[in-house]
Amino acid sequence: AQSVTQLDSHVSVSEGTPVLLRCNYSSSYSPSLFWYVQHPNKGLQLLLKYTSAATLVKGINGFEAEFKKSETSFHLTKPSAHMSDAAEYFCVVSYGGATNKLIFGTGTLLAVQP
Amino acid sequence: DTGVSQDPRHKITKRGQNVTFRCDPISEHNRLYWYRQTLGQGPEFLTYFQNEAQLEKSRLLSDRFSAERPKGSFSTLEIQRTEQGDSAMYLCASSLVPMAGGQNEQFFGPGTRLTVL
């Protein structure tokens, strides 16, 4: 079955330090990959997406992710965390087809300490 | 605001009651998706519409669930005879129909949080 695995349920960093949120996907054929962010009481917002173009994808708010086919990974990074980055982050895969339904990971809750 | 809206934002009901949620997608979007998110989990696909046609339903969507999109605009999701296990956040998303082999961004609403007592 198609799936995506987020390796950490909680990550805590200090403000100004780098962020790394890890994601691996199951590989049946070329997927589209996304990272969404969910702030409390707000809707899911797309951070970035990979759809078979450049393997290093830049998103909003300074986030980026690198698609590594050999490792079936799509880790999310940011050089310097800001307090406003505290939220839940979802790695998402879609295998296209007629539905284009999204398959979400279980989420990583990012805490940013002052 | 021209984003996806959902109503109500919160619903508390007693077990056995029926509930109905509404989703208004972005106006030019012809695809509409419903997802369910339980505590500590990521959202899971329930069903989707292209215009007024319901084209796929997940096995998660039991017979007590029904969704409609009568005029290809807003959609409703009804749960009959609610159970405590139905307690979750119900999310709606909309998108344009993607080109063949492509993938369009799905824009999410704020969700309806259902609590079944």
Image (spheres, rainbow, N blue to C red):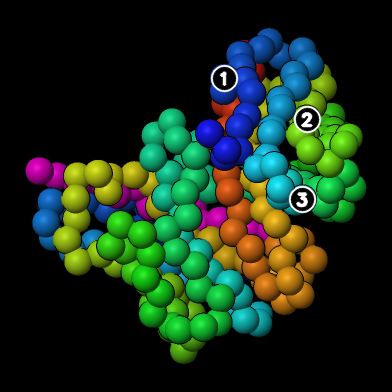
Residue at image position (76%, 75%) is: B100
Looking at the image, tell me whether mark 2 or mark 1 is earlier in sequence order.
1
**Residue A114, position as x, y percentages in the image:** 10, 43
Q: Are tags 1 and 3 found on a single chain? A: yes
Q: Which residue corresponds to mark 3? A: B30
Q: Which chain carries label 3?
A: B
Q: How crowded is mark 3: few (under 14 residues within 10 Å), some or many (20 or more)?
A: some
C-alpha gap between disc 2 and disc 1: 15 Å
- Tell us which disc is closer to us: 1 or 3: 3
Tag 3: amino acid: Asn
The boundaries of the magenta stretch are: A101-114
Residue B81: mark: none
Q: State the CA–CA distance, disc 3 to disc 2.
A: 15 Å
- Crowd rating for badge 1 (residues with CA inside 10 Å; few <14, some 14–19, many 20+): some
On screen, residue A70 versus residue B33, left or right, reads: left
Q: What element carries label 1?
A: strand
Q: Circle 2 is placed at which residue position? A: B76
Q: To which residue does mark 1 refer?
A: B10
Helix, strand, or loop for circle 2?
strand
Q: Residue at x 47, y 71 (%)?
A: A24
Q: Does the magenta stretch include residue A24?
A: no
Identify which amino acid the numbered label 1 is placed on: His
The reply to whether discs 2 and 1 touch (Cβ–Cβ < 8 Å) is no
- Placement of B116 over or under B101, stated as above or below: above
In the picture, residue B109 is in which quadrant?
Answer: top right
Give, as a three-letter code, the residue at label 2: Thr
At 75% from the left edge and 51% from the top edge, which residue is drawn? B31
Above or below, B5 against A54 in this view is above
Q: In this view, does A103 lie to the left or right of B18?
A: left
Q: In this view, does A46 lie above or below A53?
A: above
